[in-house]
Amino acid sequence: MEDLVIAVALATVFSVLICCIEVKSSSKAGFRECLTGAAVLYLLVLLVGNVATTLLAAATTGEFFVDTATSTSANTAQILPPATVAGNDQSTEKSLPAAPTEPTSSDKKTLNSSKTSKSQATEPLVLRFPWFWYAFLGVFGFEALLQNINVTFFGQGVLAISDWISKARDGAVAAAIESQTNTADQGVQSVVKKLKGLPEADLNAYVLNALGKDRLSELQAAAQATGADTCLTKALALAYEAYDKVAAIQT
Amino acid sequence: MAVDPITLALLAAPVVRLVFERVLKNRSIRFGDLIKQVEQVDPNVDRRQAKATLDQLQNAHLIKEKGSALEDFNTYYVTADGLEASRKAGIRS
């Protein structure tokens, strides 16, 4: 039971990691922008699937771990000398002073810990952490198992889990992209507001330095042709095209 | 919203596909940069055609627009429907 709880907790951690990595890499957005309601929904969908397959992995492979651990213990008992395994060796008993009839609690602890350390020493690494393997098989087996389940009813797909997951992921990625776009736009607008307060001569100097002479002429011509405010046009161009260079300008 | 055959037919048009691919690849892109990228691939596509294509994609809910004071600085970004449509149309992002 304890193994199962740890396995579910580990599957949850794996799910959070997978969710973060997938949303961040697919959206190319910042980590903060990835934290949206849609991402939480995607995480919940992933969690449901991963926890279910982790429990399934525990139910199907649990016997393997128990059987293998039992046989390993039996082998250990055969390998170790009889005196170590059972304390009924006559010759040993004769040579030793009479033992107390009831072992004390400290004796029990020592005996248990020595048994555990002996069995752990002989157990393969795979068998020592069954909870890890339940979670591992559950989470990474999820792709192969549940994502291929497609339950149909009268020819209509009603339980295409891969579709659910794809839709939830698309929602999370799109929300992160939108959030990233909004954040970038807010940054640009604050820079534009700052630059608009500068004299045009200063703005021209900044455009010349950051974007070049040709771009300055282009912007001047575009603003005059469309009747747009020349300062705003140049400020926008600077903010969008040379954000890193002008963001630090103090007005 | 599920991707319908009309949307898939829209994405089959070469110019629409090209413009959508550029937006999808960048996730979000400004109009000025988009024009430059599209012209590199197909010099026959002009600004007006690109703008009309972006409007078509917006009407199909595949992309969204974040407006600006100047057209070149309008930002276009892909939506959840756009991501789904790209998968169904076999467009790599």
Image: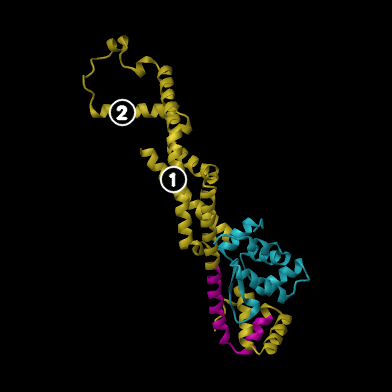
- Label 2 or label 1, whichever comes before in sequence order: 1
Can residue A129 be seen by looking at this rendering? no
Against A182, residue B24 (above or below) is above
Please name the amino acid that badge 1 sits on: Val
Q: Nearer the viewer, mark 2 or mark 1?
A: 1
Q: Which one is in front, A219 or B27? A: B27
* Residue ID at (44%, 44%): A52
From the top left corner, tell me how far across and down residue A6 is, in percent: 39, 42
Q: Say which quarter of the image contains residue A205.
A: bottom right
Q: Which one is in front, A212 or A215? A: A215
Chain identifier matching the yellow colour in the rendered picture: A
Q: Which one is in front, B52 or A85? A: B52
Query: Which quadrant: the C terminus of chain A?
Result: bottom right
Q: Which one is in front, A65 or A97? A: A65
Q: Are marks 2 and 1 in contact (CB under 8 Å)?
A: no
Q: How many residues crowd around disc 1 within 10 Å: few (fewer than 14), some, or many (20 or more)?
A: many
Can residue A193 be seen by looking at this rendering? yes
Identify the residue position indicated by label 1 in the image.
A51
Q: Chain of mark 2?
A: A
Identify the residue position indicated by label 2 in the image.
A110
Q: Say which quarter of the image contains residue A107.
A: top left
**Side (left or right) of B45 relative to A179:** right
Q: Chain of mark 1?
A: A
Look at chain B in the picture and name its colour.
cyan
From the top left corner, tell me how far across and down residue A41 is, in percent: 46, 57
Q: How many residues crowd around disc 2 within 10 Å: few (fewer than 14), some, or many (20 or more)?
A: few
Is residue A174 highlighted in magenta?
A: no
From the top left corner, tell me how far across and down residue A245 is, in percent: 61, 75
**Side (left or right) of B14 relative to A139:** right
* Mark 2 and mark 1: Cα distance apart in space: 37 Å
Q: Over which residues does the magenta segment extend?
A: A180-208
Please name the amino acid that badge 2 sits on: Thr
